[in-house]
Image: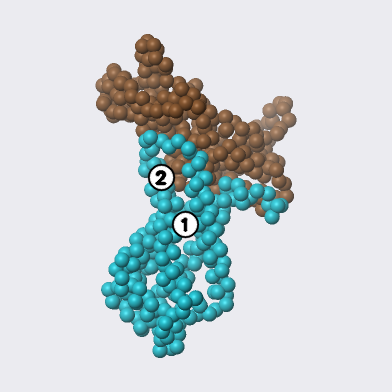
Chain colours: A brown, B cyan
Amino acid sequence: MSTGNMNLTLKIWRQKNNKAKGGLVDYKISEVSPDMSFLEMFDVLNEDLVAKGEEPVVFDHDCREGICGACSMFIDGRPHGPKEGITTCQLHMRSFNDGDTIVVEPWRAKAFPVIKDLMVDRTAFDRIIASGGFISVNTGNAQDANNLPIPKVQADSAFEAAACIGCGACVATCKNASAMLFVSAKVSQLAQLPQGQPERYRRVQSMVAQMDAEGFGNCTNTGACEAECPKGISLENIARMNRDFYSAKFVSEESI
Amino acid sequence: MASFGNAFSSSIGKKLIMGITGLFLISFLVVHCFINALIIVNDGGLTFNMGAHFMGTNWIIRAMEVVLFAGLLAHIVQGFRLVFQNRAARPERYAVNNGSANSKWYSRSMGLLGTLLLIFLIVHISKFWVMSRFTGIPTVDANGNHDLFAVMVETFKDPLLVLLYVLAMVSLAYHLLHGFSSAFQTLGWNHKKYTPLIKGFGFWFSIIIPLLFALMPIVMYLGCIK
């Protein structure tokens, strides 16, 4: 951990567009405050690049509070960098040392094509959600609290699954670029609540079919996704999705 | 099968086939290890040959042998398909990927470990199984059973073969260390009450069974059992 200002070497993936061939480019950056976030360090770098008349590095970011799931850098071989349970925007430069060389790459998966530099197209996740990750309800006034009794254990488990921010770190770190942790979280948050029951078995079949169609890999249970997930989504969700999928395919009469 | 939709062609279905065949092959390991362990009686192979005779003549076992080869073939073919599909899901590799920070190396190397086991199996089957089923075992023991034990003694005089067997069992141990509990996860058996039990049992199973297998060629080479 560094306390004084740091001089760093960044090796950043630069790629003009989806068709162009990319490569790692070296950048020297000096006087980096340890209190800066990783993205703020990139802001400083980009201001320097703009001042020099060069193209700034394109990267995704939005809330910078660790809850939106927009940021997506693969830092020194790990999604969202070396710390556990945080996104890139919550990673601070005090986690690095003066003189470090930091390699920054985009998420790499066939289903997440690079748009430019470190920005990738994650609309595959949106299409998976659109295929079934919702409940059909009549709109109107909100129901009274506790109108539908839900056991505490189940409510907690559904809530933990719902913590998924859809950043794609699971896909990025999985050796198979599998989206199972993401899809299982989205299946599990609804499968455990009464509101999710009517569409439960249709939902799991549709979402798995869409996941496969997007070109994500097959899960081999390495557990890397769970270890790297900034929201600590559990592998239990994958097992639950597997159970629901088998129930849907082998027991339920409803098919998609 | 049409009514099952695309259950087996989906990514979860493909893993289901790996999990079920994997657990079936694990059950075979237990039987194989038990029969082989009969050499420990150290009676010149009489008890072992009796076990081998039973395995070779009992019709239930012979029928299961067909299922075993079918299961093995499904596990191998599906395994290779998964490896190639999963590679294709990431066409451009990372320049730096710190996999050891989030997962065990053997869980990421099941394809490699499986390939090593396949190479071993080809040698192993051509050494023992082909002889006992097709070309015939040359001698009989005092009980009149085919003397498979004598073939074992002869085979394990070669230190290189002993080394191959030991290395293959190391591969098997690592393959099982991931495969045993992974199969249960794929089947959806992840539960706070049972998963620690499955993981604990799986760990010891993955050590003990390959260790017993590896000890057999070693003790025969050293002449402790003859």
Residue beneath the point at 42% across and 67% down:
B124
Q: Residue at x 57, y 33 (%)?
A: A125
Q: Residues within 10 Å of mark 1 (few under 14, many from 20)?
A: many
Q: Which label number is shown at residue B180?
A: 1
Residue A132 image point, x, y percent: 65, 37
- Image coordinates of residue A100 in percent, x first then y, are 28, 28
Q: Nearer the viewer, residue B170 or B144?
A: B144
Is there CB contact under 8 Å for labels 1 and 2? no
- Image quadrant holding the N terminus of chain B, namely bottom right
| Amino acid at pointer 2 | Ser
Nearest the viewer among A6 and B25 is: B25
Task: Report in which chain the residue with disc 1 lies.
Answer: B
Residue at 27%, 73% in the rendered image: B222
Q: Which residue is mark 2?
A: B103
Question: From this viewpoint, is residue A140 visible?
Answer: yes
Q: Chain of mark 2?
A: B
Residue B37 picture location, percent across and down: 40, 74
Left or right: B105 as drawn, with respect to A211: left
Residue A228: name its quadrant. Answer: top left
Quadrant occupied by the C terminus of chain B:
bottom left
